[in-house]
Each structure stands twice: as C-alpha cells, then as structure tokens.
C-alpha cells in the first residue's frame, strides 16, 4: 500500500529541520523551538494510528526513491506492525525529553536541543528504513549526537561513559556492515530488506551472519554479557539522554532481531534459540540481582532495564506469537515506564543534586504529587496487573511457557526480584524517614513537570487496561514474521532475483500451530 | 628533431602548469612584497585552465611521445582531483603563509612544479616517465617541507624527507633497471607482454616486484616504509603537510596502480599477497600508534598511514580477482582517495589556522574547549573527524562502504572484518579530539587559548572541504560513476 503523502519522510526529517533552526536562535527560543518541533512531529505521527491498516502485514506508507545507483541503495521507508508502535512511542517521548531539560540544561542549550532533534531523526529513521544500507546509516548516525549528549551534558564521569558507549556500540555495529555486504552478494544483489527477508541462505553463511547481527544488536539491547556500557551511560547521561537511551535506543537492538535476524536467518535463529534464551534469562536474573545491590537510583533503573530487556529477547527467541507480541509490547511498555522513571529521577536530581538513594529518602511528605507519579511508574515497572508492563511480561511468559516450563519458572524469578528491588527502593525513597540535608529543596512538581509526567501515567493505565488496540495492529505482521519466508504472496514487489521456494524450518513451522494470542490478552 | 604538435597538445595541461611555474619564478623577484598574493591568483588561474583542458580528455586513450605518456580517463580522474586539492592548498597557503610570515613567492612555483610531477606520474606509460614525475614531485616537496627556515623542526623534516626519499627513489630505480633487463624496455605495455610470454617464475621478476613495492611504499607511506611520515608531517608547514598528505598520496596511488595493474598485472597473484601483508600491518600500526599521539599533526599523519591501508584493500582485491571484481576494487580505491582528500585537507586546514599567540597550536591539548570559543570551527572539525572515522552520513562512510564492498565481493570478507575492527579502533582517537573540543575546559588564562585565524580564503577552503565531505556522503553517485569510468581502462 503506497500512500501518496510522504508521511514517513515528514516524520523522520521534521526534527532535523528543527535541529538546524535551534542552532541559529537564542537560548530561550531554542527551548521553545525544540518543543514545538517535537510536539509537531508527534502530531504528525498521530494520524498514523488511524491510517494504519491492521489487517495487512504489508509495509504501509511506503516511499521509494533511488539513492545510490550502483550498488542499488534505495531511499525506501515503510511501516508495519512492529515498527509502528515504536515510532509512536519515540515521537511521544521526545517532547518530554525537551520539557524535562528545560531548566536542567543550562550550558549550550541550542546545541543540546539540536542534538536531541538529530537523535530523533536518526532513531525514527532506523525504525522505518526498508533498505539495509539506509538502516545502517541511521543506525550509526545516532552515535555522534548521543556521544555528545552524554559527554557534554553528563555527570562527573561523563567522558569515560561517553567513549565507552561509543566504542561498544560502534564495535558491534561495524560487523553488521560486513554482514550487510555479505547478504548483498548472497541475496541477489539487493539491499532491500523485504527482498533479503524472502531469500534463503546456506547454513554456514546464516551462522556467520547471525553472529555478526548478534554483535550489533546484542550490544545495543544490551544482552548479558555485553551490557556493561549501559549502567555507565545511563548514570552519566543527562535525564533526556537517559530517557532516549532506555526508551528508544535499547529498542533498536531488539527491533534489529525482529526485523533482520528472524526473517533473514530462520535456520540460524532456530540453531541459536537455546543460547539466546539462556542469555535472556541470565540477563533477567542478573540484571535484577544487580539492581538489588545498587545505591544509585539511576544505576538501579539501568540494571532493571537489563532485566526488562531480557524479557524482550526472551519473547523474541521463543518464536511464537505470544512471545513476539509480548516482546513488542514490552518494548513499548519499557519505553514508557522506564522513560517515566528516568524523568522522575531527573526531576529529583534537579532538586537534591544527588542520585544516591540515601540522600533522597522520605519524599512522600514534602513532595506528595511527585511520590504518586514515582509510585505509579515503579509499580508498572514491577509488572503490577492493570499497568502496561504486566501485559507485555505476561505475554512473554505465556509464550515461554509454550517453549519450556523451566525457562518460564526461571524468568518469572525475575518478576519476583523486580518486586523486591522496586518495593525496597520505594520503601526508602517514598516512605523512608526524610533525609535532613535536602529538605529545603524539596518543592513538589511544578506545572511543567506535571505536564511531562501525566501523559505517560495515562498511558501506563490505558495500555494496561486496553492493550488490544495496540495488539491488533501487530497481529498480521507477527503472523507473517513467524510464517517466515513461506508466504511470498504478501510481498510488495517481486524479488529481483527469482529464488528457490524457501523451506520453513520445522521449529518455525511448529510454532505456527499454536493458537493465536487473542485469548492471552483477555484477562 | 621536431616534436609532433598532437603530442604537445596531449600534454597541454602539463605545459600550462610548468609554464606558469616558470612565470612565477620570474615574476617573484619583480613583484613588490605586498603584491605576492597575485602569484597565488595566477596559480589558481592556471589550475582553472588545466581543469578545463583535462575535462576534455576524459574519454578515449591516447599515447604521446612514442608511448612514454598516456592520456586516458584514468589519468584525467587523478589530474582533476589533483587540480582541486592543489587549488584548495593554494587558497589555504594564502592564509597560512601570511599568518606564518612566510612571504615567499617561489612557494607557488614549487607547488606547481610538484603538481607537474604528479601529473606526469599519473600519465606515465613508461617506468622512466613515472620515475621522472616522482622525482620532480619529491624534489619540490623536499624544499617546501623546509620552508620555515628558522625552525629546526622544519629543517629536520626536510632533511629527513630528502634522505629517505632519495633512498626510496634509488630502490625504485633499481627495481626499474631489473625490469628493463628482463623485458628489454621500460614501457609498461612491453613489460606486461614480456611477463605474459616469459611466464612468472623468474626470481629476478619477483625481486623487481619487491623493489618497486618498496619504492612506492615510501611514497604511499605504508608500513613498514612510513617512518618519515610523522616527523615530516609534523615539521613541515601545515599547508605543505596538507599538500603532501593529500596530493602526493593521490598521485602516488595513481602511479602505483598503473604500474602494478598495467605493467605487472601478470603477476598480480604475487603482489596481492605482498600487499595483503602490507595492508594488514599498515592498518594495525597506523591505527594503534595514532591513539597515543599528543600532537594533532602526528596523529593525522598516522591516520593518513591508516587510510592508505584501507585503500590498499581495494588494490589487494583487484590483484586477487580478475574481471568485474578487480575493476570495482580499483574504482573503490579511486573513490576512497578522492574522499580521503577532502576530509584530510579540511582537517589540516583547520589545524594550520588554529593559533595561539601567533603560533600554530598543534597540541591536542590546545583544542580544549574549542567548541565554546569557536563553535563553528569545532563543528567543522567534528564533521571532518567523524568522516575520517567513517561514520555515516559523511563521505568517509561511503568510501569505506565501497572498499568493504569490493573486499566482500572479491571473496575477502575476512579482510573487511579486520578493517572494520580497525575502523572502530580509529574512532577512539578521532573522537578524542571531539572530546577535547567539546567536553573539556582549557587550562590557564583566557588570553593563551587557541583561536581560529579566519580569512575569506580559509573560509572558502573549509566550506569546500565540508561540502565535499557532506555532499559526497549524501550523493556519491557522480563520483562513483567517474571512478568506475576511469578504473576499467587499466585492464
């Protein structure tokens, strides 16, 4: 389905225009300009909710133009049930990144706002690119602005954290470049993601490509044991940077698994299922244990992210409808909930200038409204039924249950640990005896901060109680993903190189026999 | 003996360049010191004429002077690139010489003579022509490296460059003489025929191959023949360093590729193994040693060594594979060097004009807090460095993309993997400059902080380099089609 209006180009590049303008104006106007552009971008992406056709697995709002003629690299964008929720989540969160930085960022405001907007363009581009090289360009282009966001406006150890973030992610993704080139020559001389997804590749090639993809995506997610950059980057980044990192950047890794690894390398995916699930469960439990031990609130949330992202990769690699839909849900929910938590911590840090738990105790008294918001996000983070995270985690666990009961039991341990570290954190921060040092600074939320948090809280409950509108928009895409390359009928255009009929692997085919996930959501 | 007119017409661009160089040498003593800028504009005018002349030589293949010189699209590609980088160097020098109070008119004459040498190099169809071109270029560069006559470091650079350069020329000449003994001629086409008829088993041939590789290795500044590079790049006046790092490297690659592909293509299996080793050690040493540098000119020197390593990947692939893979391999080298020229020239232009109390401030520490003092300059430097690191959407990424593509296409994916890992390592030292510029505060009093000494000429150079880096990154089609058009003629 080709839409005549270039929605996606508009959404992707609108922030870039804002970024250029931000560099040209004065400090105060830069703030308003950035807010205006992020809000405008959200408003532009909002109509997609209604325009999106949830009955088809085809790419929608497709735009195609030639970019590089030889080799044929296209400027092609499109949206399906997996990228769609991520796009909306990204455009939704960006205005809050601006508002939370309103007074927190004091130096070089224009550059800061410009970098936020450049980040938005790069992140949105990653989610809608339909050409592998174009994807890679967006994927790498976000490194520099993020490096600057952490390095210029970060905490005391920011230089170390920034370079560590940069080198980790770059080292992972350069291998992806070689994998992309290898795919090009084995996949019929095309970089078109859809055409490459329809191809079949030899077993050893799939293994190598899987490992290269894994290097890029696992660092980004981050999966255990490649997660060590994350706590540093999260802790040192300014609040908006942490929100972007946790809510959007990490999703690029899991999105990569869904968009590339699963459809292009089905055999290798099946081969590596067990180690991937083992790593996911390790991440869930390890992240939660590490979170228990933290004294820095941001670091605690960072490790909880490792744990939560473990659920996402777990859901992806159990290879069934519940698992994958749960994974996508969890991606969105983690974006909203952890984004909300980081916003809360940022607001607190502006007052007390400490992220240490013991410096920020007993907030329920002086900051009742703040405590309420923090509590809601925290409960959502531990997966309380009625909140958004419950839906995702439940679906993932349901999917895992179909795969292995032991794995489900182990993963569920992560939920219990999450309850432990979150409730313990809340006990101290919200209900503990107030720390005397910062009493004077503990003003409750002002209007700007309330406005930042309210929409996310609303979403926590809306998605928690009515997840179906979101789920229905993924069904068709996830079904196609699990059907593997077996259904060329839904392809947008015929493959340039006719290929032999792909044979779906036994495991992928078996997963198809599971009932649809509809009943899992009816609670 | 009369020289045919069409031969002279064929080398008209070279004649224009040499003629202008002589004119400048004559005009220099006549002109008043305040009017020396005129010489720079004269140089630019000559370059503009040459640009027009060479543009008309883009098609076909024409030999001149009984097959000593060849005019083809391959030579034209390099010449056009050389005109552009020379023109930008002249504009940069206009600003730089003033700032350094080096008011020497011969400077532009030497630039043009070096350019003439480079043009002869890329147009040579005979080893001796290429050798003559190399010498003309090198002799001019030796002098230019030592132009800061009052500075010991500049003189040391000149002396070191001369000694090692002369040494490498000797080795090159020795290799040429062995080939002459083997084939009975120094024409590349005759040598290629001789290899085809005599077979490749001759040990003398292998020896000649190695000697030529060593000789060109010095000019290309690849490991282990790179020793002179950091010292010379650091000691020479920065505008000269930029010229050496860009134009001399481009011309050397042009001559090197022609000799090895056109003349020694029959033994490509042998030299591709040799260059695989050189490529690997160049990538490793260039990138690793760059990390520990504290002087930005030295760091860029090691970075330029590393970039020669990336370009060599294309050469290796071309040597191992025949046919289509070879010509895309060569085209990717052409593209890579062209892109490398813009980003390196831009970086050196900034380095040369960043000054502290009238002195060049080339320590990395001097860049602390530059983003606050000179936001625009810091941003330009950021773009050049990001491009050198090969991060999209800059041209540096496109260059690496085509090189790695050639490697994977040629069945050498492992080499691409090694290269991308070193590319990731290189990001560390490029980003360190970004870190210093954006994330550190300068120490000491504000008066002693480095600032950019701007001038219209410099702004123009920087704008051109930035445009090259950004536009070639976004729209590489034109340059790639030029490169593919130029490359296959070598077969």
Image: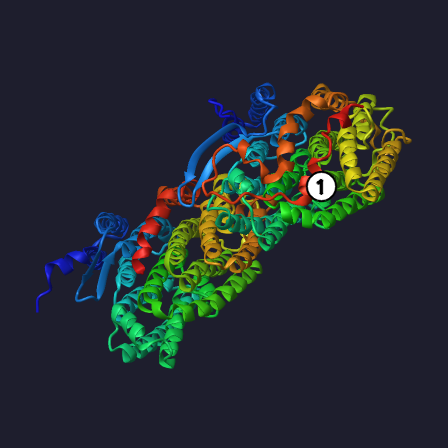
Element assignment for label 1? helix
Residue picked out by circle 1: A313
Q: Quadrant of the N terminus of chain B?
A: bottom left
User: For residue B291, what is the image quadrant?
Assistant: bottom right
Host chain of mark 1:
A
Q: Is residue A62 left or right of residue A97?
A: left
User: For residue A32, what is the image quadrant?
Assistant: top right
Residue at 32% x, 66% y: name it.
B259
Q: Find residue A78 and report its horizontal and vertical position in percent.
A: 53, 31
Q: Eyeballing the image, is A209 above or below A519? A: below
Q: Eyeballing the image, is A85 above or below A292? A: above
Q: Is residue A471 left or right of residue B335?
A: right
Residue at 22% x, 47% y: name it.
B52
Q: Eyeballing the image, is A400 above or below B83? A: above
Q: Find residue B180 and report its horizontal and vertical position in percent.
A: 28, 77
User: For residue B311, what is the image quadrant?
Assistant: bottom left
Q: Nearer the viewer, residue B122 or B319?
A: B319
Q: Find residue B254 and report its horizontal and vertical position in percent.
A: 34, 60
Q: Nearer the viewer, residue A304 or A16?
A: A304
């Amino acid at each position: 389905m080709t839409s005549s209006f270039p929605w996606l180009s508009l959404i992707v590049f609108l922030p870039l225009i804002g970024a250029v303008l931000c560099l040209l104006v004065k400090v105060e106007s830069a703030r308003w300009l950035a807010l205006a552009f992020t809000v405008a971008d959200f408003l532009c992406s909002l109509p997609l909710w209604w325009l999106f056709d949830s009955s088809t697995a085809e790419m929608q709002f497709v735009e195609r133009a030639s970019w590089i003629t030889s080799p044929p690299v296209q400027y092609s964008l499109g949206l399906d049930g997996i990228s769609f929720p991520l796009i909306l989540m990204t455009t939704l969160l960006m205005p809050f990144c601006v508002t939370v930085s309103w007074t927190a960022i004091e130096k070089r405001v224009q550059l800061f706002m410009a970098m936020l907007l450049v980040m938005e363009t790069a992140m949105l581009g990653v989610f809608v690119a339909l050409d592998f090289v174009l994807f890679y360009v967006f994927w790498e282009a976000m490194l520099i602005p993020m490096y600057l966001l952490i390095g210029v406006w970060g905490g005391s150890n920011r230089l170390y954290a920034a370079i560590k973030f940069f080198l980790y992610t770059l080292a992972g993704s350069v291998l992806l470049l070689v994998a992309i080139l290898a795919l090009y020559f084995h996949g019929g001389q095309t970089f078109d993601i859809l055409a490459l997804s329809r191809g079949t590749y030899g077993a050893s090639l799939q293994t190598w490509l899987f490992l290269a993809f894994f290097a890029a995506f696992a660092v980004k997610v981050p999966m255990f044991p490649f997660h060590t950059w994350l706590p540093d980057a999260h802790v040192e980044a300014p609040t908006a940077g942490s929100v972007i990192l946790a809510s959007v950047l990490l999703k690029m890794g899991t999105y990569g698994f869904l968009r590339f690894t699963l459809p292009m390398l089905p055999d290798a995916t099946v081969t590596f299922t067990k180690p991937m699930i083992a790593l996911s469960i390790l991440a869930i439990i390890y992240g939660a244990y590490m979170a228990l031990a933290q004294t820095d609130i941001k670091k605690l949330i960072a490790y909880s992210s490792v744990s939560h992202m473990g659920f996402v990769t777990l859901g992806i690699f159990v290879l069934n409808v519940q698992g994958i839909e749960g994974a996508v849900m969890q991606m969105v929910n983690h974006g909203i909930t952890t984004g909300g938590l980081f916003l809360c911590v940022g607001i607190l840090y502006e007052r007390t200038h400490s992220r240490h738990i013991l410096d920020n105790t007993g907030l329920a008294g002086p900051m009742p409204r703040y405590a309420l918001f923090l509590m809601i996000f925290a409960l959502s983070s531990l997966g309380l039924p009625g909140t958004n995270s419950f839906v995702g985690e439940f679906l993932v666990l349901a999917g895992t249950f179909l795969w292995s009961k032991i794995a489900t039991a182990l993963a569920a341990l992560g939920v219990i640990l999450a309850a432990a570290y979150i409730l313990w954190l809340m006990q101290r921060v919200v209900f503990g005896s107030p720390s005397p040092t910062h009493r004077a600074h503990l003003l409750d939320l002002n209007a700007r901060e309330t406005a930042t948090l309210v929409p996310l809280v609303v979403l926590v409950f809306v998605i928690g109680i009515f997840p179906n509108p979101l789920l229905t928009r993924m069904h068709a895409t996830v079904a196609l993903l699990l059907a593997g390359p077996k259904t060329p009928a839904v392809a947008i255009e015929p493959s340039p190189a006719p290929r032999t009929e792909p044979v779906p692997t036994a495991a992928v085919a078996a997963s198809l026999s599971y009932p649809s996930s509809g009943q899992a959501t009816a609670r | 003996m009369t020289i045919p007119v069409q031969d002279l017409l064929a080398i008209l661009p070279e004649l224009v360049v040499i003629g202008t160089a002589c004119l400048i040498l004559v005009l220099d003593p006549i002109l008043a010191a305040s009017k020396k800028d005129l010489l720079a504009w004269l140089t630019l005018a000559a370059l503009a004429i040459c640009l027009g002349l060479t543009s008309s030589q883009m098609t076909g293949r024409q030999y001149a002077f009984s097959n000593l010189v060849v005019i083809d699209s391959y030579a034209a590609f390099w010449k056009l690139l050389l005109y552009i980088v020379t023109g930008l160097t002249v504009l940069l020098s206009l600003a730089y010489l003033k700032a350094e109070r080096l008011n020497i008119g011969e400077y532009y004459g030497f630039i043009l003579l070096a350019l003439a040498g480079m043009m002869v190099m890329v147009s040579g169809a005979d080893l001796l022509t290429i050798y003559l071109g190399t010498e003309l270029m090198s002799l001019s560069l030796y002098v230019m490296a030592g132009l800061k006559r009052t500075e010991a470091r500049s003189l040391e650079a000149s002396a070191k460059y001369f000694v090692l350069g002369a040494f490498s020329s000797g080795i090159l000449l020795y290799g040429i003489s062995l080939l002459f003994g083997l084939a009975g001629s120094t024409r590349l086409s005759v040598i290629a025929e001789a290899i085809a008829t005599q077979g490749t088993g001759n040990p003398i041939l292998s020896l000649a191959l190695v000697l030529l590789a060593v000789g060109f290795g010095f000019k290309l500044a690849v490991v282990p023949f790179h020793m002179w590079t950091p010292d010379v790049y650091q000691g020479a006046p920065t505008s000269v360093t930029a010229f050496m790092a860009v134009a001399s490297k481009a011309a050397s690659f042009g001559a090197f590729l022609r000799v090895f592909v056109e003349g020694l293509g029959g033994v490509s299996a042998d030299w591709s193994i040799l260059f695989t080793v050189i490529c690997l050690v160049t990538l490793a040493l260039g990138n690793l040693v760059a990390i520990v540098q504290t002087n930005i000119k030295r760091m860029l020197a090691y970075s330029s060594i590393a970039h020669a390593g990336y370009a060599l990947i294309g050469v290796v692939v071309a040597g191992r594979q025949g046919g289509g893979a070879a010509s895309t391999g060569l085209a990717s080298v052409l593209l890579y060097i062209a892109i490398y020229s813009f980003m390196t020239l831009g970086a050196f232009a900034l380095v040369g004009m960043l000054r502290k109390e009238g002195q060049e401030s080339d320590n990395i520490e001097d860049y602390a807090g530059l983003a606050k003092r000179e936001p625009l300059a810091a941003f330009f430097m950021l773009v050049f460095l990001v491009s050198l690191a090969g991060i999209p959407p800059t041209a540096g990424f496109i260059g690496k993309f085509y090189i790695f593509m050639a490697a994977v296409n040629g069945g050498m994916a492992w080499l691409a993997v090694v290269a991308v890992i070193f590319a990731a390592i290189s990001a560390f030292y490029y980003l360190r400059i970004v870190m210093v510029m954006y994330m550190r505060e300068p120490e000491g009093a504000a008066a002693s902080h480095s600032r950019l000494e701007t001038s219209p000429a410099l702004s123009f150079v920087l704008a051109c380099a930035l445009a090259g880096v950004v536009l070639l990154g976004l729209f590489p089609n034109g340059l790639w089609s030029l490169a593919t058009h130029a490359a296959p003629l070598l077969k």
